[in-house]
Amino acid sequence: MLQKAAFLFFLSAFGAPALAQPEFQVTTSELDDRKAVFGTVQSVDVVAARARIGGTTRELAVDEGSAVTAGEVIATIEDPKLGLRMASLDARIRALDAQRKLAQTELNRMRKLRTSGTISQARLDEAQTNLNVVTGNRAAIVAERAVLEQQMSEGAVLAPAVGRVLRVHVTEGSVIMPGEPVAVIAAERYVLRIELPERHARFVREGDEVLIGERGLAPGDPDSQRKGTIIQVYPEMSQGRVIADVEAAGLGDYFVGARTRVHVATGKRKTILVPAGYLRQRYGVAFVTVKDEGEVMVQPGQRLGDQVEILSGLKPGDILLQH
């Protein structure tokens, strides 16, 4: 009992032996050297819904921002002259029906007279030819009427693709000519279009991964960045810049033309990464504990997951202690 009390007194007087602290040896790591550029939300395909006939816009079913499906009627064009032509063709068909009936009656009469030997074969052939001519004329008018029906049906302006209406160029009651655009539609697939300086062109490849910031132009939180993939690099430069398209999920919620930050890898660099738990902040200054040296002030950089980049203050081989 006395020995135990003496041992406790010894510990209290000189302190218990320190527990072994976890150590981390500083090494260099290779990271992508990323450059922040602005990406613009663009539709892969922007198509125009055009009028196929000329006339007056009677119905307009969409407005800017409306979602449309392929083949949906977005406007109706009417031409009063087409209705008048249709009435004229119907009247001509009725007249030819009457002529055909008369020619058929005449042919039947000639056949009876030819059987009795009253008329010559030439008169019978003439009656047959007359019926054939009337029948042919009627068939031509019916075909012309079918063409007119198709032309009238083309007054319906159809959406060429699934997407969203960007611009509407007409209003109800406005006159439009064949081939003029009624609305411009952005196809449903969207990409981020980025532009990089010419000196970075050799680093950009299809399939490369990029980091996309939050909506808007603010830097945002690095932890909220999303990943995207470069799907196309255009072979032609524009004003000394290389253009590329980035595919990422959720771009359909953005406005077409909206800009956001995109971080693109433009090479590799060596740096020092330290677990965030080894750093502590005091009065706005970051410190780490280096074995055999004590506290050392460091300059932290960007945070990558649970690690922090150290810009200065440490060198490879240093051993850090958990504080």
Image (cartoon, rainbow, N blue to C red):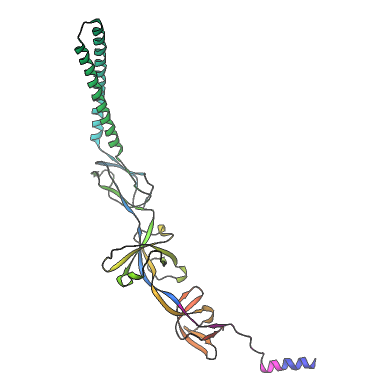
- Position above or below: 186 against 241: above
- Quarter of image, res 56: top left
Where does the N terminus fall, quadrant-wise?
Answer: bottom right
Q: Which quadrant is the C terminus positioned in?
A: bottom right
Asked whether 20 falls inside the magenta stretch, the response is yes
**Lateral position of residue 233 relative to residue 176, left or right:** right
Q: Quadrant of residue 178?
A: top left
* In this view, 6 is above or below 68: below
Residue nearer the viewer, 64 or 25: 25
Q: Position of residue 322 (x, y in %)?
A: 56, 83
Q: Which residues are magenta?
A: 10-29
Choose between 6 and 105: the one closer to the eye.
105
Which residue occupies the foreground of this view, 180 or 25? 25
Residue at the location (63% across, 88% down)? Answer: 18
> Residue 315 magenta-drawn?
no
> On screen, 21 above or below 252?
below
Residue 48, x across and y down, in percent = 30, 50
Q: How many marks?
A: 0
* Residue that protrudes farthest toward the right in the picture: 1
Measured from the top left, where is residue 250 in percent x and y? 43, 59
Q: State left or right for residue 254 relative to residue 307.
A: left
